Image: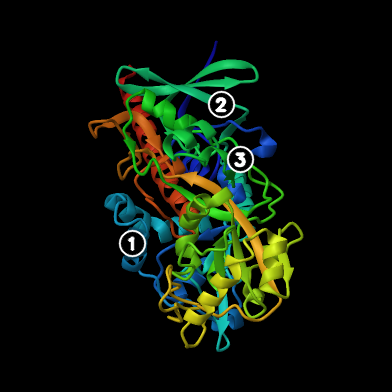
């Protein structure tokens, strides 16, 4: 069996993993990245994101410092307000039902802006997210849910950038290299056993960083931890995130942590492919807040206007899964159809249209008796008030359950459209417990020497729900931290060896 030695080995090759590798390389001489996928399928879940990043910022100047090349006219046409660390923290705590690890949330919030600055200093480009969550009111764009910044080129742009930086930093990447077990030397993790096309190998390392995603692409683990029917949901992202890193760490005594029965789920086109589409076709359906969602019985089942879709979409996929046939329909009329995002108008979008509710029900396969009643009940309950898609407008319903708390516009102007959706999973919330330096902790809360983790296999950050844009941010923040820690420990170990050598 071939054996190799490096300072730091990083398992995974998505956003968190490459941020860890780049940070580790800043202070250690030899860093190796192990990517289970072949080269043409590399990149992890980063490849499937639109590139939105959620960060704390204090006004337009800090936003423009990241965006950099926004024109004066563009800058003058936007209203970003401010999103203070306290506001960001409160959002995270609220949407996760105050169950997330407060120390990890604090790190995520406090390091969000500095980490994006770090990436920009290396050449990553950002832009205003005018096409995702912006609405123009009184001549100025406002950003729904405090997320005004995205990466140029989206997730693929991020992945391409990180691979270029890794190559320029002389970081080796092995493809089709599946890590299968951690090596130990006493209490210390000392390397990784990896399966490659050339056979099994052992990589010895001072530090190992696990950053290879959750278990969302593993139907057995989904059924075991998430529950019934989760084994048949669509996977939005990488087919290679099957929980390998989590299991390897648990095998050496790591502490399972976080919300193991929770995940980031979303309403998706019912005809979306079973795994992430690398052609970057958008199958997510996040504009439910401008209409209503009904099941095949014609009944509503959520408060579509509870909050901005940025704060609810990752939870509503679970609600769709609970409906008969794991199916729901997003309903709009002519007044709000123009507000829908571009993916609703794409060629691959599944949609039905009709000039009457009865005919729409017949075409879409919704109960033709109850559906018109539901719409009438909703229309009758919609209160007067100004509709403002760019703010929580308070235009709500009264006297029906579930209520609609904002954007309750009657559905009364044909043509009517229905978009059938099912549940898609992005990543899982349960994983490994880490400290604020990225070390993996054991069942007694002690550091496992030589083992660090970052990205979606870290538990304790998200519970029940997730505000949009946090995935890339959390991956980059904790990847950078874990890599910095690993690189420093590897350098310290090298220095100790050197001083002990006669």
- The residue beneath circle 1 is 94
Please tell me the numbered disc located at residue 167. 3
Around disc 3, counting alpha carbons within 10 Å, would you say few (fewer than 14), some (14 to 19), or many (20 or more)?
Answer: few
**Residue 83: image location, x then y, percent:** 39, 70
From this viewpoint, which residue is outermost toward the top?
Answer: 1
Give residue 238's position: percent from left, percent from top.
Answer: 59, 41
The relative height of residue 54 versus residue 198 in the rendered view (above or below) is below
SS at circle 3:
helix
Splitting the image into 4 quarters, where does residue 1 fall? Answer: top right
Q: Tell us which disc is closer to us: 1 or 3.
A: 1
Q: Which residue position is annotated with label 2?
A: 178
Q: Earlier in the sequence, mark 1 or mark 2?
A: 1
Question: Residue at point 61% right, 48% down?
Answer: 47
Judge by depth and name the residue closer to the eye, 213 or 449.
Answer: 213
Between the C-alphas of marks 1 and 2, the distance is: 37 Å
Q: Would residue 462 be found to the left or right of residue 74 on screen?
A: left
Q: Nearer the viewer, mark 1 or mark 2?
A: 1
The secondary element bearing badge 2 is classed as strand
In terms of sequence position, does the residue under pointer 1 or pointer 3 come before the other? 1
Q: Number of marks in the image?
A: 3
Residue at left 65%, top 52%? 270
- Mark found first going from the N terminus, 2 or 3: 3
Give how far apart the Cα atoms at labels 2 and 3 are: 20 Å
Residue 176, percent from left and from top: 63, 28
Compared with 7, 82 (above or below) is below
Taking depth in this image into account, of 332 and 148 the one nearest to the observer is 332
CA gap between label 1 and label 3 equals: 40 Å
- Taking the spot 52% from the left edge, 42% from the top edge, the residue there is 18
- In this rendering, the label closer to the viewer, 2 or 3: 2
> Is 498 positioned to the left or the right of 131 in the image?
left
Q: Is residue 274 left or right of residue 13?
A: right
Instruction: Quarter of the image for the C terminus: give it.
Output: top left
């Amino acid at each position: 069996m071939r054996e190799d030695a490096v300072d730091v080995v990083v398992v995974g090759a998505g956003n968190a993993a490459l941020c860890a590798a780049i940070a580790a390389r800043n202070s250690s001489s030899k860093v190796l990245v192990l990517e289970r996928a072949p080269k043409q399928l590399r990149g992890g879940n980063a490849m499937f994101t639109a590139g939105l990043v959620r960060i704390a910022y204090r006004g337009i100047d800090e936003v423009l410092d990241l965006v950099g090349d926004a024109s004066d006219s563009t800058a003058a046409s936007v209203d970003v307000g401010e999103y203070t660390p306290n506001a960001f923290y409160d959002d995270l705590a609220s949407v996760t039902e105050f169950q997330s690890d407060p120390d990890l949330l604090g790190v995520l919030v406090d390091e969000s802006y500095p980490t994006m600055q770090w990436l920009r200093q290396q050449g990553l480009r950002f832009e205003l997210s005018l096409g995702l969550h912006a609405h123009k009111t009184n001549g100025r764009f406002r950003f729904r849910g405090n997320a005004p910044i995205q990466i140029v080129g989206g997730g693929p742009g991020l992945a391409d950038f990180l691979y270029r930086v890794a190559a320029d930093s002389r970081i080796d990447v092995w493809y089709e290299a599946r890590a299968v077990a951690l090596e130990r030397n006493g209490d210390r993790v000392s390397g990784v056993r990896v399966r490659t096309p050339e056979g099994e190998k052992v990589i010895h390392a001072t530090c190992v960083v696990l950053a290879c995603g959750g278990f969302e692409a593993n139907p057995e683990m989904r059924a075991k931890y998430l529950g019934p029917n989760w084994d048949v949901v669509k996977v939005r992202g990488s087919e290679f995130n099957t929980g390998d890193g989590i299991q390897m760490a648990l095998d050496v005594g790591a502490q399972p942590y976080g919300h193991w029965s929770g995940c980031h789920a979303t309403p998706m086109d019912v005809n979306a492919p079973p795994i992430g589409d690398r052609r970057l076709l958008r199958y997510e359906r996040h504009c439910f807040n401008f209409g209503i969602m009904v099941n095949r019985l014609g009944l509503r089942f959520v408060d579509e206007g509870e909050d901005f879709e940025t704060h609810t979409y990752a939870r509503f996929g679970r609600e769709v899964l609970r409906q008969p046939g794991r199916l729901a329909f997003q309903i709009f009329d002519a007044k709000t159809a123009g507000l829908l995002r571009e993916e609703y108008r794409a060629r691959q979008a599944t949609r039905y249209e009709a000039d009457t509710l009865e005919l729409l029900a017949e075409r879409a396969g919704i109960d033709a008796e109850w559906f018109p009643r539901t719409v009438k009940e909703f229309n009758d309950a919609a209160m007067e008030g100004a509709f403002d898609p760019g703010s929580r407008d308070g235009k709500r319903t009264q006297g029906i359950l579930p209520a609609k708390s904002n954007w309750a516009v009657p559905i009364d102007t044909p043509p009517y459209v229905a978009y059938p959706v099912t549940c898609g999973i992005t990543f899982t919330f349960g994983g490994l417990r880490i400290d604020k330096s990225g070390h993996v902790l054991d069942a007694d809360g002690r550091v496992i020497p030589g083992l660090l983790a970052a990205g979606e296999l870290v538990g304790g950050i998200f519970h029940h729900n997730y505000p949009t844009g946090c995935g890339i941010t959390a991956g980059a923040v904790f990847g950078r931290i874990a890599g910095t820690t690993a690189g420093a420990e590897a350098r310290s170990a090298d220095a100790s060896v050197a001083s002990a050598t006669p």
